[in-house]
Amino acid sequence: MPPTTPTPVNRDEAPSRPPVRERGDACPGALRLHSADDGRLARLRLPAGILTHRQAQVLAEAAERLGDGHLDITSRGNIQLRGLAASCGDELGALLDEAGLLPSPEHERVRNIVASPLCGLDGSAAGDAQSWARELDALLCASPAATALSGRFLFALDDGRGDVAALGADVTLLARGDGAVTVHTGANRSGVRVAAADAPRAALLAAETFLTLAAASGSGAWRVRELPPGPGRELDGAVARALARAGIGAPGDGGSGGFGGFGDGTSADGTPGDGGSGGFGDEASADGAPGDGTSADGGPGDGGSGGFGDEASADGGTGDGASADGGTGDGGSGGFGDEASTDGAPGGGTSADGASGDGASADGPAWPRSGPPAPGPTRSPDGTVALSVYAPLGRLSAGQWRLLLSAGAGGVRVTPWRGVVVPDLDPAAADALLDRLRTAGLITDAGSPWHGVGACTGRPGCAKALADVRADAAGALPAPGGRDALPVYWSGCERRCGHPGGAWVDVVATAEGAYTVSVHDVREVHGPTPVATQRELAETIRTARKTTTTATTAVTK
């Protein structure tokens, strides 16, 4: 088949007509269960993905006693339990509450906080994103206003390495090498600089400012990128003014921290920094005037052609992303997806505003860039080892989950790439555990054929799906792609629930046994190529994963 003409994707045009949300957010939670074809579904928010050893054990118990015996990891580092009985809500809530996993029933669906999972474990953090997450969670749960946030609103706390900053969050904290933190809303790459001690409070103020503008606009916007053009342009300046009124400023300008200025960047009070080291210019000033790189419209996320998806839905229909009709993923296509890669494969280096892989953007200074933790061991400066493993298609049995807990009592960190980091292990215990995890079927190195492969739930769990994509993905499993291969994502229908951001290979079911394969890079789509047989499908996917993101031809059989 000859190459087809690429179909351009102009993501800058998409936010010009943002949706008007005319109904409340029906996103599932731990207390609000969702009905799927395989039973009820509960989604438990885990700020920064952190679970104590006891909390992780409770989740395994809940999965076995009340659900189908499995735990699904979402692209926000949350956990879903499936196959729940309709009558189990009270028992599940009591179990989670006793374990300290429901600090505020009114806020449980808005605790969407991702943080750099290796922070404090590999010696490379420029800021303590894990402690920010704990403080921000406490502030969220104490804020009456925060209960109005959508269950899709996302905070990303990046320790400076640039991993979670690329996930298209609504509010991002990014640690800088000079000791400061920049606060970003949506696709604004410029941000407002604050002292690290003030960063969690600044993140909450940014979210509350968004709520004020969303209410005033009448749009019912759930996410920053859904604000109408006017309020979208106003948000960055409004956040800067709110921070200034709260006494939160850049180090050295009256805020806490006591540092000097920062090169030619503007401080939160609108005055130039006094020449401190490590300048990151173009920050928004407190008077509302955007810096040189502020996006004029809030900028689109790193979207693709699926629903307004920001988190994979484990049933193909209840992700943290709403569908184009404003529902919970149960209809419509088109819109924006900011999903991370499903199993830990890098998402092509796409920045949070959809810019290309080097992190540079017309919207401001380049951000640092880092992929997800590589599968396998990471040595910590204190001599301990952290193990990073991934679950094939993001799903673990309770037995596999308990195996993760068997080598230590330090708990786990669930990652937004559907993986788990087990910290603070003795090196010998880490080696033994790694072998056991590999034998148990988890992804422990980049040589696994499952590395970089993801899928929605498909049949039989989702009534919208046209195929059993998980079984088909296993049947067409290609040879290992390696670290440079594009991630591949299987979708049971055109909604593409849970697809990754950045560059990826898009495999979409069109009928029983039939699929299309296309390559999505940052600015365009190559394909699609119809494929009808498993043999052709495996070969087409293998070829597509080797495609560079600057290609101008479609993937062919």
Image (cartoon, rainbow, N blue to C red):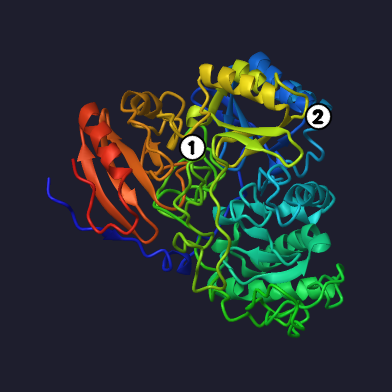
Q: Earlier in the sequence, mark 2 or mark 1?
A: 2
Q: Quadrant of the C terminus?
A: top left
Where's residue 330, x and y in %? Answer: 47, 40
In terms of depth relative to the viewer, which is nearer, 426 or 189? 426
Q: Quadrant of the N terminus?
A: top left
Count of number-bearing discs: 2
Element on which disc 1 rests: loop
266 is higher (above) or lower (below) than 466: below
Residue tagged 2: 97
Whole-Å distance between the Cαs marked 2 and 1?
27 Å
Q: Is residue 85 visible?
A: no
Q: Residue furthest left?
A: 1
Left or right: 328 as drawn, with respect to 305: right
Q: Residue at x 46, y 30 (%)?
A: 457
Left or right: 523 as drawn, with respect to 107: left
373 is higher (above) or lower (below) than 356: above
Residue tagged 1: 317
Q: Is residue 283 visible?
A: yes
Where's residue 543, x and y in %? Answer: 26, 41
Q: Residue at x 53, y 43 (%)?
A: 328
Left or right: 445 as drawn, with respect to 281: left
Identify the image quadrant of residue 273.
bottom right
- Residue type at mark 1: give it: Gly
- Residue type at mark 2: give it: Asp
Where's residue 271, x and y in %? Answer: 76, 85
**Could you classify mark 1 by the number of other residues whose Cα lies within 10 Å: few (under 14), some (14-19), or many (20 or more)?**
many
**Could you classify mark 2 by the number of other residues whose Cα lies within 10 Å: few (under 14), some (14-19), or many (20 or more)?**
some
Element on which disc 2 rests: helix
Mark nearest the camera among 2 and 1 is: 2
